[in-house]
Amino acid sequence: MAKVLVSACLLGAKVRYDGRDNLLDHPILKRWHQQGKLVATCPEMLGGLPTPRPPAEIQTRFPILITTDADVDVTPEFLSGAEQALELARKHECCCALMKARSPSCGNQEIYDGSFSGTLVAAPGVAADELLRNGIPVFNEHQLCELIEFVEQNIQAA
């Protein structure tokens, strides 16, 4: 079975910006984890950011600028983490990724708009975008059925 890159917070690692996790308790994920099919990552930590850390949001895309709520530029850490997440996915031959929705790194469909007001915009996070641009499909925790179907089809095609 192909491997799946997964946001570490979804597997219970306390790596979120606020030091908590987003544990996703699902029997198929548990089975895949036991089978060694999941590759955990936290792009923000890969990029050198600590846990806990100030919340960050993407301010602009061209040029890319990511800042904390205290206006500290964390763009280099986010970009480095995105590149390392892609390298990890390639190294482990991941067929796809399961990433945390709405994260400035991992969100695959929508992220916060940069105003720190809770407003969402249709755009991917930095790491999800890097994976998508390199042909690795990204699902979020609200798309588990689609992820499972994709992985099962990927197994049959292999």
Image (cartoon, rainbow, N blue to C red):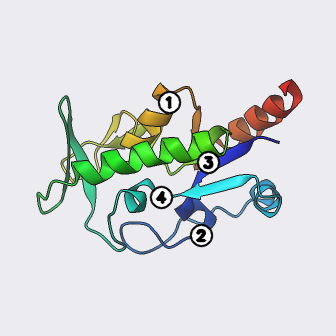
Which residue in the structure is indicated by mark 1? Answer: 132
Q: Which residue is mark 2?
A: 12
For label 4, the crowd category at 10 Å Cα-Cα, with few meaning under 14, some 14 to 19 and many 20 or more, is: many
Question: Residue 16: x, y in percent?
Answer: 43, 66
The label shown at residue 5 is 3
* Identity of the residue furthest to the left in this view: 71
Graded by Cα atoms within 10 Å as few (under 14), some (14 to 19) or many (20 or more), the crowding at tag 3 reads: many
In this rendering, does residue 78 appear at all?
yes
- Which of the two discs, 2 and 3, labels the residue nearer the N terminus? 3
Alpha-carbon span between mark 4 and mark 3: 10 Å
Q: Residue 123 appears at what percent x and percent y?
A: 37, 33
| Quadrant occupied by the C terminus | top right
The reply, left or right, for residue 70 in relation to residue 35 is left
Q: Residue at x 27, y 62 (%)?
A: 55
Q: Is residue 129 above or below residue 25?
A: above
Tag 2–tag 3 contact (CB < 8 Å)? no
